[in-house]
Structures are given as C-alpha cells and as structure tokens.
Amino acid sequence: MLVGLNTNDDAAVYRLNEDIAIVHTVDYFTPVVDDPYDFGQIAAANALSDVYAMGAVPLFALNVVCFPAAYIDVLKEVLRGGNDKVKEAGALIAGGHTIEDEEPKYGLSVTGIVHPEKVIKNSTAKPGDVLILTKPLGIGVINTAIKGEMCPSETYLLAVEVMKYLNKEASEIMKEVGVNACTDITGFGLLGHAYEMAFSSGVTIEFDKDSIPLIEGARELAQMGLIPGGCYRNKKYLKGKVCIKVEEDEVIDLMFDPQTSGGLLISVSEEKAEELYRRLNKKLKFGAFIVGRVKEKQEYDIYVR
Ligand code: CO
Ligand code: CO
Ligand code: CO
C-alpha cells in the first residue's frame, strides 16, 4: 500500500509492480441540480477529480446508483450524463450497481493508474511552495440559493459549467511541470482541504484573502445570508486550526463553503510556480489563481491574511 487512510488523501493507491500503481476512489451524492443530464455529468466530474488530484489517469468507472423505481426515465438521463463525462475523460463505464431508494443518489467508483513514483499526494507540500487553485469558489452558496429559488439564472448556469468541468487538463499540466502536492476541493471547502494538506505535510498554509477567486454572483448571494449548513460545519471542524487575521466577511464564508466538483489546489515550488501558473491560465476554462504560500509549521495550520 502506498497511500491509505493515514493521510486522508483523495484516493487509495496500491502498487502493483515497479511501473504501475492502481488509484481507486468512490464518490456519490444526492442531486445538486434539477437537470438529470447535468447532474450525471457533475457526479462523474466530481468522482474523476480524486484520480486527477493524485496525478493519475482514469481507466474505467462503475456506476453507484440509488434511485426510485418510478423515475427510470430520469435515471437514464443521469447515466447518459455520467457516461458522456467519463468518455470525455478518456475512460469508460464498465458496469455498476443499482438499488431502489426514495432519495436518488448517483456517483461513481473510478479506477486509474499512475507510476508509483509519480503519485501526487496531499501530504508533501513544502515550505516556500506557492499554492495555485484551478476553479473559483461558491458552489455551496449557489446551490443553497438554487434550493431557495433565489439564484439568478446566469449565476446558476455558470456554476453548472464550473461543476461539469473536468480537472483533466489541470492534472496533465501539473504532472508535466512537476509539483510537490495536490488535492481537490470538495465538501470540506478550500480551508478544510487545505487543512488536510497542511496537517499531513507538517507545514502551515497562508492564504491571501484578496486573491481568492469567486464565481461571479456568489459573493452577493453569500451577502444575502444564503450560507449552506456544510459551511458552518466546516467552520466548527476547523476551529483552533485556522487563524483569520483579516476582517471576516462573505469571502471568508466562501473559503469554508463546501464545493461540488471543485478545482485542484496545487502546491508547487517557487521556481516552477510561474511556468505552472502561465500554462494553467492558458489552457483552463476558469483560469488559475495564486492564492497563498506554504510556510514552516507555525501555531496554526492555516492563516488567512
Ligand atoms: Co478529493
Ligand atoms: Co472525493
Ligand atoms: Co492527492
């Protein structure tokens, strides 16, 4: 075993031989959008993301489905979305399992491969590293606004695009450039996943609040108080671990905001940071953002300045 439960990394990694390690992960959840085809794509992009965060290439996936029997037509659209997204990733769906459930849930178990020496862990960030984030934040807040029917349609459409967007190119570029650590941003929010990285690497992470990218419209919705329960849970969990040195406002809320299919948080050496930043920005649909720095371990695991 290379990577297991000990460092809370994104996926399990198992070395088969000198050249190949298997990367394995599973992720599923209840619908985050009304459109079943979009939901299928989002669930697949989200599940694939853990494989990309490890620097691996996805090979195949299995569907994990819980669905009410009366909605088979809707399920077909969900599966079509999942299938199309997995295809876009260059992988294929090889089967799956369905059980009847009143509350629909969908996701995938994804299997990928990586060279055992090229596994990108979340526990190997180094002091002096630059932190780059590859998608803007705000998904949880926007989903809360959607549920409350208070989300402007352009914000909704943008959020769906962000969630559907694969971390494939980001992963390929970071592998080519060579980075020290990576994780993807999902339910624990930027600060929660950054905490896992800081703690398991034995370092402190410093974020610059003004550099945090937000999905257009998310800030206004957070200002209106449309904060998801997961955001408060993340805040509570990170108490005593995160020190906020600036005035708390909606940007801070959005840093705790749980994301669905969020971007990669990449820790890269200062010498390679500029090249990585430039190449990511050239290629990625939502750009790349330098959001902070890795420091020697200090009193708190994370500081926001
Ligand atoms: Co992950
Ligand atoms: Co995951
Ligand atoms: Co990882």
Image (tube, helix red, strand yellow):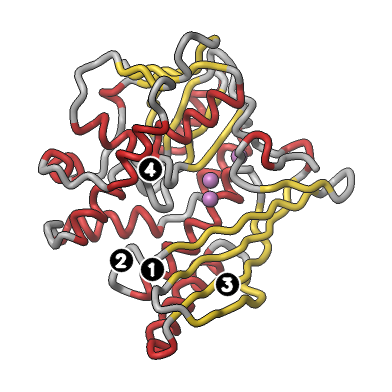
Measured Cα–Cα span from mark 2 to mark 1: 6 Å
Q: Is mark 1 within 8 Å of ligand 2?
A: no
- Numbered disc 1: secondary structure: helix
**Nearer mark to the viewer, of 4 and 3:** 3
Q: Which residue is denoted by mark 1 in the rendering?
A: 39
- The Cα–Cα distance between marks 1 and 4, rounded to whole angstroms, is 18 Å
Q: Position of residue 262 (x, y in %)?
A: 41, 47
Q: Which mark is residue 33?
A: 2
Answer left or right for 119 relative to 155: right
State the SS at label 2.
Answer: loop
x and y percent of residue 145 in the render?
18, 55
Disc 4 crowd, CA 10 A, few/some/many (<14, 14-19, 20+): many
* Picture residue at 52% right of the left edge, 48% below the top: 169
Q: Position of residue 109 (x, y in %)?
A: 61, 63
**Label 2 vs label 4, nearer the camera:** 2
Residue 63 — which label? 3
Determine whether 283 is above or below 124 in the image: below
